[in-house]
Amino acid sequence: MSEQVLAAGQNVVAPSGLWDVGLNVRSGLDVDLCALLVGEDGKVAGDDDLVFYNAPRHVSGAVTLTDDPSSTGLRIDPRAVPAGVARIVIAVTVEVKGSLTGMNVRLQGTGAGPVLAFAPVQLDGVTAAVLLEVYRRAGSWKVRAVGQGWASGLAGLATDYGIAVDDDSGDDEPASSQGAETQQEPDARRASGDDQQVSADRAGLAGDLRRLTAQRAALSAELFSLTKRVRDARAELVQTDELALLQEVGYYQFSHPLDDAVAYRERLDALRGKIKAAIRDKVAVRSRPGWMVNGSAKEGAALVRDFGTLMLRAYNVEADNCVRTVRPHSLAAAIKRLDTTRAAILKLGASMGITIDDAYHQLRVDELRLTTDFQAKAAQEKEDTRAERERLREDAKALAELQREEARLLKERSHYETALARLLEGDDVEAQERIRQQIRDIDNGLAGVREREANTRAGFVYVISNPGAFGEAMVKIGMTRRYDPMDRIRELGNAGVPFRFDVHALILSADALGLEAALHRAFAAQRVNRVNLRREFFYVSPAAVREVLLEIGRDHILEYKDTAEALEWRQSRDGASPDSAAAGSGRAGVQLRRQ
């Protein structure tokens, strides 16, 4: 993998995937790595936004100090970074003031992109330094090399970024040292007459210290190994959970693709007819002939038949329970459960050669698959019906608004015609012409309203966003036929979201459906919900939508706002600033002394 060396102040696009931040230092330099998650104002939202040796993991899971005992590092997951965090500040601290020159920091992504390296210079006489900043820009992440030092250590660095630091954090260690000396004074007096015994005790303590240090290193290595295994297991669990979630919202791969739920029901009924026929024809259970009881083949056959019936009953009870409880996302688990049940029942009949027939078992498995197919198809048709009803309601509202506007214009035209008739009895030519112009304007408005009534593809395409609810890198691109499109936008910003939507563009078009579809195709790869295409949200910035609109061209002349005002969200955010929150809560502050 290639390496890109950064100069102080240089910024580049961050690599893809998760980010691993490592630190290489010169021999004899003992440093600690830390990170601060700050907002647009350059301050943290709370004390939990400092990740360091006493708080090695952010509450969101976005930043974690690595557990490798041989090196210091950070693991950053950009997907988990809270929406209110604009920058992640990566810094280094040292206990004793000196020179931090001679180190280099490396940021490497798990996906594509080079390894980013930076070696700060002129960091003499400092105890803390900011090495890198990872920040959001236009919907993506970038990395900036900084190299700025602090003489006041971690406490000063944290304070500058809005952390409330406990003033007593540095006073405990001298007190504990003094306590240790006080504890050792009686021992020293008791051992004052025997210097050799003191030396032996010291040698023993040194040996214990070496042994405990070795044990600590071994435990740290074991902890790192276990953490890696847990991380790998969680990754597999996330994939399973994600698949189940997709299936719950409708992303389901049908085992028997048919046109509608009725066709699935007919296929399912036919399959259940085959299951009943297998039971009726006594081919669901197989057994070996020749079993005898008390020397009687007839009694042996009756025993085998009765025991086989009991086994089939137990199997069918479990199969019927699986059919009743199975859901599209739990199909694999239900099939495995039925396989396990069959295997357990077969063990009971092994000595008598009784088995559940393979073909019958396959019929019950097919029943499970068809049941989930039917459920998924029925849910899909229900969603389609709901969406069609919503579309019809929206069209009805738009038509009613256009008809009301037409009636208003006709009434207004009638008033002006009456006024014109009165003016024609006099000789005020200027007033007559003014009334005629107003009538012409009304006729133009009537023509536009009637054209929109006749053209069902005409309407407004809107581009809106809601930074407080969805973040600043997401927009909704939709279409409405309402006479006043703001009525529809106000409905979207009802009690279901915490803040109102901001409007970036309203475009009146004779082919609004075509324009909306063109924009959706342009941002297909940035769709938020790639399963339900009626959810028209996209991971793009308003500026990116404007660029596509300019490329599409046509005859769309519009006024466009690149930045959302989001007044309610910004006022709510600024009203709960870290400084005011700290002052009002009376909190004790962050404890910086190692625990």
Image (tube, rainbow, N blue to C red):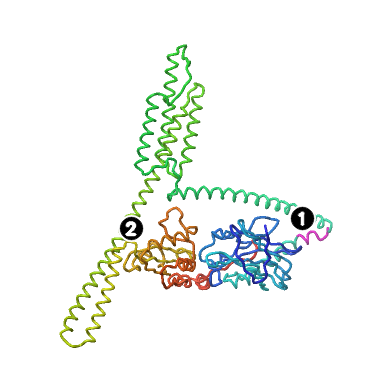
Quadrant containing the C terminus is bottom right
Q: Nearer the viewer, residue 510 or 475?
A: 510
Q: Is residue 190 above or below residue 577?
A: above
Residue at position x 33%, y 54% from top?
388
Residue at position x 38%, y 24% from top?
281
Please tell me whether mark 2 sits on a helix, a strand or a loop.
Answer: helix
Image location of residue 116, percent across then percent down: 66, 63
Which is more N-terminal, label 1 or label 2?
1
483 inside magenta stretch? no
**What amino acid type should be assigned to the residue bearing mark 2?**
Arg
**What amino acid type should be assigned to the residue bearing mark 1?**
Leu
Image location of residue 350, percent across then percent down: 51, 24
**Magenta stretch in the rendered image:** 187-194
Residue at position x 63%, y 49% from top?
226
Image location of residue 300, percent across then percent down: 45, 16
Residue at position x 44%, y 23% from top?
307
Q: Quadrant of residue 27?
A: bottom right
Q: Residues within 10 Å of mark 1 (few under 14, many from 20)?
A: few
Task: Pick out the residue farthest to the left.
Answer: 425
Relative placement, left or right, of 287 versus 378 is: right
Mark 2 sits on what residue? 391
Separation of marks 2 and 1 at Cα, in angstroms: 80 Å
Quadrant containing the N terminus is bottom right
Mark 1 sits on what residue? 205
Q: Which mark is residue 544?
A: none
Q: Is residue 124 above or below residue 298?
A: below
Q: Nearer the viewer, residue 517 or 112?
A: 517
